[in-house]
Image (cartoon, coloured by chain):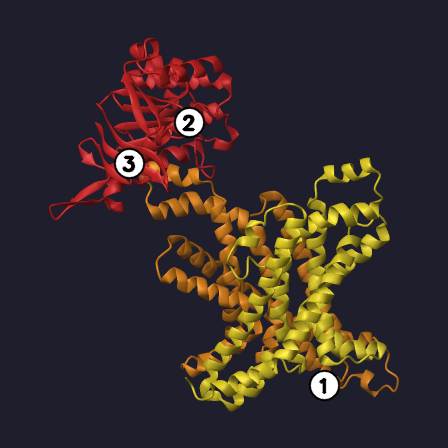
């Protein structure tokens, strides 16, 4: 990276537009990584959360208590600790994962424990009469779920799931602790080469705002259309 | 019992003061900012509403880690104010969660039925009296369950202070213990989890008492959430 | 066709049905009347296996609903056994319980194809035929939420009939309808009663309908049958004071 002129200047301005433009490409590249992790992590959270919700409804002895305890522990301990846990403990069991993958897994599993509650609320909101009608028609269990209950429960949970995707996006920077080059880490690297942190960190903040604010507006519109659980 | 357990516990507990100060300070600041910004969102003057909205959306729209780094690394350059890491942490925790709390306060105040306002008008109460004596006591009952979630989110967020060198429970575990007691890694994480679980339970216990007191003051039975048994109800964000 | 013997049902400490015995012959139309909370609806829910009895046995068409034979011994019925017997029973609910995520056609073909294994064409032909019977042919591709309550209930009746059940359970099927829509649904039920030989059990507050539809009326009170007679007898000269009080209260309200 070329040495920016601002470092050489005796009295650098508080905000250097030239320098800001210089660091922008690196930050945008890191933003793509951040989005990738968010999308993969969200996919995992949505799938695993649904599995947890359906599993918990089946009330299988022992398994139910195990899943309950797991969900409570994950929701009551810091995500950062869980990231470290996966990053440090997995290799000890012969499972060497890239930092990127650790990020996807940690975020996905963490958020699955929240989305499972969203699904549960959505499933509970389907009237009892729907289960009874399915029984009266002798529909098999699997068909009752896939044709009757989930098609009614899922639209209602979309806004809440959308909010969790946005939350996850904003928590991706925690992964800088294990070396993932997401937006904040990229800003830190840019800054530590030039000793100017104002521009990189400010741009990093604005990038988050530029994506998550419109996204949350979209979720709010969706909420008005399909309601919430 | 593993030989190193007492030492592991001792080192982790060295981080407890930082974690507790961050959490308690953060929660205190969150409550103040939540009410200030939440009521401002409902203010009659447009300028006040807009300012509050900018604060709320600004902090909800950006990442907490960015906010932390900005206040710790950028603010000193801009205004020459270098904060001690722990205080910078408390400030960020409060500012961030206060933005979420503001929406809780706003929603709760708006959920008080119209008829209550009309009753106050009929009795000739001033807007300030109306808010303090009638609306807020009712709204607080609605706020407490979501505030419980918010406080537990804040507790979990204290871990990010380890990223700016605050020696909290997380930093003690990951930076001090694991390099020295590698073979006990799983145990270290288990004890860390227990510490955070206990703190979360403490917060929930305090909030339960608050919920009961608030509910009794407005002559209501505790809500379902107040009687439920889960440690953390659905996420606050 | 239906035999209840010594059936008991409790919710916690509250006894809903105690030592209940009664039989219904094939093709019979039986109306269950009585004050609310007397256990009428519970009987239908037990027959549909939406709830399990706490004691006694229930037989439908010679097969036991509550128990099954395993190794020569009677044991509580398992899910598989219950599923098999259930196919012969259909139910129409007070709140219709149509699937809002499917069209009218979807509601009608879902179970015949998935449960009875009919082909799409066969199930569709059945749906068309039944919708004609209930007078809603033009609504076949409508969504249930776009229909009036009376239309929804007709679709629900057609949906139950699409399974060709031996026994049809009607649970206060007109209670949720606006008064002007009640007559149409009752006429449809009379029509079905005349055209088919389905055994029908019907919980209702419509005494006029019970009078001309039922072969037998069972008066319930406190979880027991206190009077069992043809409608001509039960409505004209009830034996019990409780029955007289109940009928007077219902007729006054109407």
| Nearest to the observer: residue B21 or residue C176 | B21
Left or right, A35 with reference to B25: left
Q: Which residue is mark 2?
A: C36
Instruction: Residue at 72%, 80% (x, y): give it.
Output: B85
Provide residue A130's location: percent of width, then percent of height: 42, 39
Instruction: Work out whether disc 2 and disc 1 sit on a shared chain.
Output: no
- CA separation in Å, label 1 and label 3: 81 Å
Q: Which residue is mark 3?
A: C8
Q: Nearer the viewer, mark 1 or mark 3?
A: 3
Q: Secondary structure at mark 3?
A: strand
Q: Earlier in the sequence, mark 2 or mark 3?
A: 3
Which disc, if any, is residue A193? 1
Q: Is residue B236 visible?
A: no
Left or right, B139 with reference to C52: right
Circle 2 Cα neighbour tier, 10 Å, few/some/many (<14 / 14–19 / ≥20):
few
Disc 1 is attached to a residue of which chain?
A: A
Q: Colour of chain B?
A: yellow
Instruction: Residue at 40%, 47% (x, y): give it.
Output: A145
Chain identifier, colour orange: A
Circle 3 Cα neighbour tier, 10 Å, few/some/many (<14 / 14–19 / ≥20):
many
| Nearest to the observer: residue B152 or residue C223 | C223
Provide residue B121's location: percent of width, then percent of height: 81, 38
């Amino acid at each position: 990276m070329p040495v920016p002129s601002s470092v050489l200047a005796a009295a650098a301005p508080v905000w250097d537009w030239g320098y800001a433009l210089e660091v922008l490409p690196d930050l945008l590249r890191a933003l793509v990584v951040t989005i990738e992790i968010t999308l993969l992590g969200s996919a995992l959270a949505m799938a695993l959360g649904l599995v947890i919700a359906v599993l918990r409804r089946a009330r299988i002895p022992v398994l139910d208590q195990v899943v309950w305890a797991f969900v409570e522990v994950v929701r009551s301990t810091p995500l950062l600790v869980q990231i470290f846990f996966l990053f440090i403990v997995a290799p000890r069991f012969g499972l060497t994962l890239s930092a990127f993958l650790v990020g996807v897994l940690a975020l996905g599993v963490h958020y699955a424990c929240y989305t499972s509650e969203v699904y549960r609320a959505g499933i509970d909101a389907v009237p009892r009469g729907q289960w009874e009608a399915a029984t009266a028609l002798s529909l098999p269990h699997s068909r009752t779920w896939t044709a009757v209950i989930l098609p009614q429960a899922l639209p209602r949970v979309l806004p809440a799931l959308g909010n969790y995707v946005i939350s996850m996006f904003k928590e991706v920077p925690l992964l800088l602790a294990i070396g993932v080059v997401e937006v904040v880490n990229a800003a830190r690297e840019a800054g530590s080469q030039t000793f100017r942190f104002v521009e990189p960190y400010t741009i990093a903040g604005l990038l988050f705002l530029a994506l998550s604010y419109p996204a949350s507006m979209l979720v709010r519109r969706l909420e008005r259309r399909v309601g919430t659980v | 019992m593993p030989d190193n357990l007492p030492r592991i516990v001792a080192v982790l507990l060295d981080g407890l003061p930082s974690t507790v100060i961050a959490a308690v300070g953060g929660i205190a600041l969150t409550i103040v900012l939540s009410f200030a910004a939440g009521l401002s969102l409902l203010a009659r003057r447009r300028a006040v509403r807009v300012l509050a909205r900018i604060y709320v959306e600004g902090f909800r729209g950006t990442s907490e880690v960015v906010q932390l780094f900005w206040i710790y690394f950028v603010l000193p350059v801009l205004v020459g104010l270098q904060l001690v890491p722990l205080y910078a942490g408390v400030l960020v925790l409060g500012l961030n969660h206060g933005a979420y709390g503001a929406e809780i306060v706003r929603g709760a105040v708006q959920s008080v039925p119209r008829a209550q306002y009309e009753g106050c008008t009929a009795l000739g109460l001033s807007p300030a009296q109306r808010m303090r004596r009638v609306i807020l006591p009712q709204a607080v009952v609605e706020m407490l369950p979501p505030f419980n979630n918010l406080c537990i989110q804040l507790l979990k967020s204290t871990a990010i202070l380890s990223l700016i060198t605050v020696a909290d429970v997380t930093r003690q575990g990951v930076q001090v213990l694991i390099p020295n007691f590698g073979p006990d890694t799983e145990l270290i994480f288990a004890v860390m989890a227990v510490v955070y679980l206990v703190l979360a339970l403490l917060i929930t216990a305090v909030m339960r008492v608050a919920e009961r007191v608030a509910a009794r003051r407005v002559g209501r039975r505790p809500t379902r959430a107040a009687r439920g048994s889960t440690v953390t109800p659905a996420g606050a964000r | 066709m239906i035999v209840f013997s010594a059936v008991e049902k409790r919710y916690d400490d509250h006894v809903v049905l105690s030592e209940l015995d009664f039989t219904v012959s094939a093709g019979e139309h039986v109306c269950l009347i009585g004050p609310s909370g007397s256990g009428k609806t519970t009987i239908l829910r037990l027959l549909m296996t939406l709830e399990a009895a706490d004691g006694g046995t229930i037989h439908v068409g010679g097969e036991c609903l509550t128990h099954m034979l395993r190794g020569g011994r009677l044991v509580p019925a398992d899910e598989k056994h219950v599923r098999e017997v259930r196919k012969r029973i259909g139910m129409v609910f007070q709140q219709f319980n149509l699937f809002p995520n499917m069209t009218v056609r979807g509601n009608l073909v879902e179970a015949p194809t998935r449960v009875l294994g009919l082909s799409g064409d066969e199930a569709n032909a059945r749906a068309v035929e039944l919708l004609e019977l209930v007078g809603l042919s033009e609504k076949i591709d409508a969504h249930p939420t776009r229909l009036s309550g009376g239309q929804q209930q007709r679709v629900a009746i057609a949906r139950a009939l699409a399974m060709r059940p031996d026994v049809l359970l009607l649970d206060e099927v007109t209670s949720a309808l606006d008064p002007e829509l009640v007559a149409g649904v009752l006429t449809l039920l009379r029509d079905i009663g005349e055209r088919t030989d389905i055994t029908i059990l019907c919980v209702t507050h419509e005494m006029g309908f019970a009078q001309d539809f039922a072969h037998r009326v069972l008066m319930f009170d406190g979880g027991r049958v206190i009077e069992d007679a043809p409608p001509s007898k039960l409505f004209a000269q009830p034996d019990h004071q409780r029955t007289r009080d109940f009928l007077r209260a219902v007729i006054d309200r109407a």
